[in-house]
Structure formats: C-alpha cells, structure tokens
Image: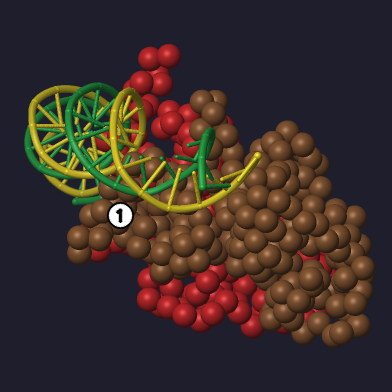
Chain colours: A red, B brown, C green, D yellow
DNA sequence: ACTTTCCATTGATTTTTGTCAATGCCATTT
DNA sequence: AAATGGCATTGACAAAAATCAATGGAAAGT
C-alpha cells in the first residue's frame, strides 16, 4: 500500500528506513470508488492526496455548469487544492476518482509536523512542487505558442498514459477545447 | 540595493540579521539596461534573478518568429528558466529587460550552498515556488474556463501594475492573443 | 528638436473553433 | 438477448479570433 509513495520519496531524497517508518505514521490510507468525490468546491481541502493506485482529476465548474479539468493524477502523482489546503479557504476545485483508487492522505497537521520534524520531507516537498511548477509552465507555453495539432501531439508524447486511460472529452476539457474540436484534430492527424 | 529582497525573505521566513548577512555574501548584483538580454534561448541558465528594480519578461519564440511571453517580473519577483537552471540543459526561454533594471543573481553554486547551510533558505524557496505554482494554476484555469473579457478583467485586478507598465501587445502575447484581438476586447469593455 | 521606430486602433476578410443536432457504437446492466 | 447510457464522430451553421493592410499618434534615440 505504501510502495509507490516510498519509492517516489526515495527517488528524490535519500530517506532511511527509519525515516520512512516515521513518515508512515503521518499518512492516512483511503480507498475511493470510481466517480466518488475526494473534495467538493466550497469545502476546505484538508489534505494532499498521493495516488497509490487508480486515477483522479481536479476540475472547476463555470457558471454555465461546464467542467474544466485542471489536473489528472495517476499512480505516483499527488493531487490537492493546494491554495485551499494552505490557507483553509474554501476550495475552488473539485476532485473525484476516474477509476477505483487507493490514496495516501497527508493532513494539514501531518504536513506541518513533518516539516518541523523531518527536513527531508521539506526537501521532497520543494522538489515535488518545483517539478509541478515546471510542468505547468510547459503547459502554458504549449497553450499560448503551439497550434492545436502540435499541442495534442505534445500531450500524447509527454503523458501517453493519461491519453490512454482518460475519456477523450476529458482530454478536450483539459486542453480547453470542446470534444468536437478535439475529435476533428485527431481526424486530421490520423490522415498523416 | 538589497532592501526589497531581504524584505521579501523576512516576509515569509523569520531570518535573523546574521542570516541575512550570510545570504548577502551569496548574491551577485547586476544592472541591466532596457532591451538587454539576461538569458538567451540555447544558453544554460546559470542563475535565479531577483528583481530589485525595473521589469523583465521571459518568453519563447516559435518557428514563425513570434514571441510568446511566459512571465513578467517586477520589483519583488524572481525570474529564471528554472528547468535549465536545475538541469543545466539549454534554456528554452529568453529573458530580457523591459526597463532599466537592478537584479540580485543567485548562481547555481550559491543556491546549492544555501540549501545546505541555511534551512530557512530552503523553506523560503519552497514557499516561493508554491506561490508561483498556485499563480500558474490560476492562470491556466483562467485560460481554459473564462471568456476573454473576464480573463482580461481578472488580469487587471490581479496584476494592475503589469497592465500599466507593459505595452499592450505584450499583454496580448502573455494571454496568447493577437494585439488586434486584445484591442477589440478592451474596446468592448470600455463601452460598459 | 527632430527623426525614426514602435505601437494601438480600425476595417475587411479568412480561418478556426464553438454550437446544435443527429447517428452509431460499445460496454454495461438487466 | 435486449435495453440503456455514455461517448466519439460527423455535418451544418454561427461565433470568435487571426490575418492582412492602413492610419495616426506617441515615445525613444540622436
């Protein structure tokens, strides 16, 4: 249940077995069924969720009721409404499960304790967020500078697993497009 | 010359005067004239730049030679090609000065030393990047979920200084629009 | 002060994307 | 086996944004 998380930690920072045992005491395992909510807009986000198994998404809903996907999270990724988590303001994103999933939750108190007690946790956190920041920068660069076909091609090459496991209309939402437009882009690309 | 930087540090993490004196030894002041490059695509980015005075931008250039602005940095902000800085791969962004500017540069060795020697530097870095990550998330949400007028209104309300100090065609580039389209959006909004 | 480059705006037109509606398919469920 | 619901695709049309071209005006550099 903790394998992927520990592996992810060790991959970036040299945690000892003793330290991992301490980390373990701060985690809460949670199972989620497909379509179940982990977080609803308006509630305060009280955790960072690490995905051991399954797939989740975070998304906002506009005035017209349309969903706009902010992030997907597969095995080895973390997902949260970080702003809500850090400030205890109401969340602006929803999070739900796309598949039956197994999570490890880091509560706010766990997060704060680990920052105090385990310097390596802070290092891991810093590296983790830095990676997420860089990925987000790439996403924006892709949006503002690439034609649609290339954007979709880039998505496939960077996140092939997401494109495989997630329905296309959600990929479209993630890209800020309608499902029809994405379908037509794909058609064009197949011809080549 | 160091006032804004120290204030920014202290604002997030309780640095002592002694610690700030240590930090100071790791910084390199640099002045930049308007239009001068701080970084060119293809070079390795060897610093994180903190803006004490002035304004800079980072941007990529596509095959057709069009510029796409990734980020603006005014006083109190940092700017870099973080991926290039961390990996020593060639930079994909250019950085140049929009106004005569004064910077404090953190070299890679300074960065690494400070991470080792000053835990508070790591904490500051983590908080700083977390803030940048959250801002970026908002930018994406804005792009994929808001109509153009609201996106521009949001930009004005979040970054009024940028809109004032930066030419409109650069704002358009930052938003992923042509200057003509932004001009028309503004016209519509003025009528209200 | 003068010249030159840059910049915002506007109009006309084309291209791209969204909207609306319908169809057929596949995977589940009953 | 039949029915259901979710999903991708397609077509026709509308709306939004890009492109091309021209103008006037302000700002920067000399």
Residue A76 position, x and y percent, is: 63, 53
Residue A82 in view, yes or no: yes
Name the foreground residue: A173 vs C27. A173
The residue pinned by badge 1 equals B186
Secondary structure at badge 1 equals helix
Residue A80 position, x and y percent, is: 53, 66
Q: Is residue B136 left or right of residue B189?
A: right
Q: Is residue B132 left or right of residue B124?
A: left
Q: Quadrant of the C terminus of chain B?
A: bottom left
Name the foreground residue: A123 vs B120. B120
Q: Is residue B151 above or below residue B81?
A: below
Graded by Cα atoms within 10 Å as few (under 14), some (14 to 19) or many (20 or more), the crowding at tag 1 reads some
Q: Is residue B68 above or below residue B25?
A: above
Residue A52 position, x and y percent, is: 60, 57
Q: Is residue A175 left or right of residue A126?
A: left
Which of the 4 image quadrants contains residue A177?
top left
Query: Which residue is pictured at 41% across the width and 64% down the height?
Result: B156
Residue found at the very far top of the displayed protein: A192
């Amino acid at each position: 249940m903790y394998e992927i998380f520990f592996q992810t930690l060790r991959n970036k920072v040299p945690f000892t077995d003793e330290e991992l045992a301490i980390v373990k005491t701060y985690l809460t395992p949670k199972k989620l069924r497909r379509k179940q909510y982990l977080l609803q807009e308006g509630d305060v986000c009280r955790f960072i969720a690490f995905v051991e198994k399954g797939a989740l998404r975070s998304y906002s809903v506009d005035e017209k009721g349309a969903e706009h996907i902010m992030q997907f999270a597969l095995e080895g990724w973390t997902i949260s409404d970080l702003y809500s988590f850090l400030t205890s303001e109401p969340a602006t994103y929803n999070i739900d499960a796309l598949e039956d999933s197994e999570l490890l939750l880091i509560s706010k108190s766990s997060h704060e304790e680990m920052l105090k007690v385990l310097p390596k946790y802070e290092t891991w956190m810093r590296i983790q967020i830095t990676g997420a920041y860089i990925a987000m920068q790439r996403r924006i660069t892709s949006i503002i500078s690439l034609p649609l076909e290339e954007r979709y091609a880039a998505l496939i090459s960077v996140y092939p697993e997401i494109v495989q496991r997630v329905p296309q209309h959600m990929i479209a939402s993630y890209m800020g497009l309608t499902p029809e437009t994405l379908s037509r882009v794909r058609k064009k690309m197949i011809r080549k």
